[in-house]
Amino acid sequence: MKFVVPYLRVVAGMFAAITLWLAIVEVLNGNPADAILFLAFAAGLGYLAIGKPLRDRRRRIKVEQDAIAARAEAGHRAFLAGDVHAAMAPPPEPSKPPRIRRGVVIAAAVAGLFVLMGIISDISDGLDSPTKDDVSTTPRAAAPTTTTPYATSAATTARTVAPEATPATRISTTQVAAVASTAVMPNVVCMDLQAAQDTIQAAGVFYSTSVDATGQGRAQVWDRNWVVVDQTPSVGASIGEGDPVLSVLKEDEFSGC
């Protein structure tokens, strides 16, 4: 059993880190009750992973210190009683600290890497929905300017040679045509936010915005936990970068889907 305990503590520490991150996510989403629940789990698992070993270590150190103090007191009394041999007896040797196994260190490193990758993945999913301030729109290109060349004739050429001739007038026309958007707004209502963003990107628009449908301004850190309940513009409308606005609710909230 002693061989398995360190690995169980590594597992407890990993789940403590995961539940702590979930508590942070719930705080960002405006759910304090769920955050407190996750914090309670994180505290319990953290105690099993770190708190209990530290408490056992302090207890072991205190026992060793008490043994040394008792030996010193016994030596002092023996010296006063004239028993020099007992008074000069060496103190008890401290117990050796437990050896840290290489397998436990490797398991802890793997668990930490697993938790870190999960956090980075969650943050990356949350950054897929930039705000309108972060959206950069692609400038629309104008159609090239066409210029009508000079119209000349033999008579005009003759007049340009004469001193009293008037210079020919250059006539140019500019046609500006706006580039029509080729992207069409798909129907993403009742999709989770991540799937909705992927669908809009597949339609040809990379940037879209998500907003909390309750008006509380909650951040959509974990996109797959949110459901689209409304979209702007409507299905079939032409869209450009930053035009789609998705109103979302959490999965456990009533969305009508």
Image: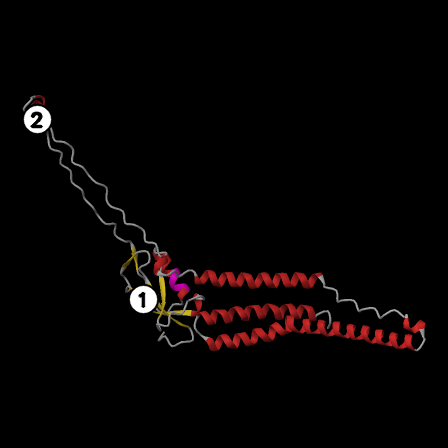
Q: What colour-coding does the image apply? A: secondary structure
State which quadrant residue 109 falls in: bottom right
**Residue 216 x, y percent position in the rendering:** 37, 72
Residues in magenta?
Answer: 194-198
Residue position marked by numbered label 1 in the rendering: 231
Q: Does 76 sit left or right of 156 as displayed?
A: right
Q: Which image quarter holds the C terminus?
A: bottom left
Q: Residues within 10 Å of mark 1 (few under 14, many from 20)?
A: some
Q: Which image quarter holds the N terminus?
A: bottom right
Residue shown at the point (65%, 63%) measured from the top left: 107
Question: Image height check: is 156 above or below 14?
Answer: above
Q: Nearer the viewer, residue 190 or 28?
A: 28
Q: Any mark on residue 141, and which?
A: none
Residue furthest out toward the front: 80
Q: Does 241 sit left or right of 2 as displayed?
A: left
Magenta residue check for 149: no
Under mark 2, the amino acid is Thr
Residue furthest out toward the left: 164
- At mark 1, the secondary structure is strand
Q: Any mark on residue 156, and which?
A: 2
- At mark 2, the secondary structure is helix
Label 2, label 1: how far apart the Cα atoms are: 64 Å
Under mark 1, the amino acid is Gln
